[in-house]
Amino acid sequence: QVHMVESGGGSVQAGGSLRLSCSASQSVDSASTLAWFRQAPGKAREGVAAMTIAGTTRYSDSARGRFTVSRDNAKTTLYLQLSNLEPEDTAMYYCAAGLSGLGKISNWEPPLDKSAYRYWGQGTQVTVFA
């Protein structure tokens, strides 16, 4: 069963922008915390950004200031605006969902640890060339 579907990836020149989208199926609790991860070839999957249903966000150091996460709670959809992209951002980007209960707590910071998330998408490829 497909729980999460990502879209919006592509190839872009360094300094460019992309907007990723992720839609969750009805099997995913709409109150879930949603997050973006990425995995480059030969590297471990790393957290990029996450957002709770209460609106609290968390970013990795590499994403902060360049990427912006947002969500449409009515559609259980997560977005990631990628700006000022660098070749080092080249990776498969995945969205994930989980932690539905904790995300309702105001100011609770969502984790960027992949083990915290239950549902995953198939990924969308982002390639940044110099």
Image (cartoon, rainbow, N blue to C red):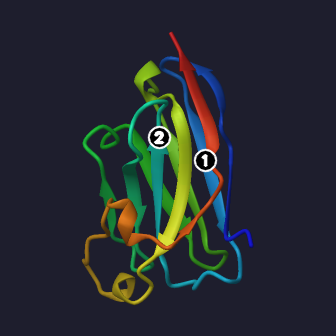
Give the CA distance from mark 1 to mark 2: 15 Å
- Please give the count of numbered marks on the rendered protein: 2
Q: Secondary structure at mark 1?
A: strand
Residue 8 as seen in the image, left or right of residue 128: right
Residue at 42%, 43% in the rendered image: 67
* Residue closest to the far front: 42
Residue at 45%, 85% in the rendered image: 100
Tell me residue 32's x, y (percent): 49, 80
Tell me residue 9's x, y (percent): 65, 38
Residue 38's place in the image compared with 40, above or below, is below
- Please give the residue where the numbered disc 2 appears in the rendered image: 39
Residue at 48%, 20% in the rendered image: 15
Tell me residue 37's x, y (percent): 45, 51
Which residue is at the front of the view, 92 or 14?
A: 92
Residue 78's place in the image compared with 94, above or below, is below
Quadrant of the image occupied by residue 108: bottom left
Residue neighbourhood size for the residue with mark 2, other residues' Cα within 10 Å, grouped as few (<14), some (14–19), many (≥20): some
Name the mark nearer the viewer: 1 or 2: 2
Residue 107 as seen in the image, left or right of residue 26: left
Tell me residue 21's x, y (percent): 64, 54
Q: Earlier in the sequence, mark 1 or mark 2?
A: 1
Q: Secondary structure at mark 2?
A: strand
Residue at 46%, 19% in the rendered image: 87
Residue type, mark 2 in image: Gln
Residue 31's place in the image compared with 2, above or below, is below
* Residue closest to the far top: 130
* Residue closest to the far right: 1
Residue type, mark 1 in image: Leu
Residue 59 as seen in the image, left or right of residue 16: left
Residue neighbourhood size for the residue with mark 1, other residues' Cα within 10 Å, grouped as few (<14), some (14–19), many (≥20): many
Q: Which mark is residue 20?
A: 1
- Image quarter in which the N terminus is found: bottom right
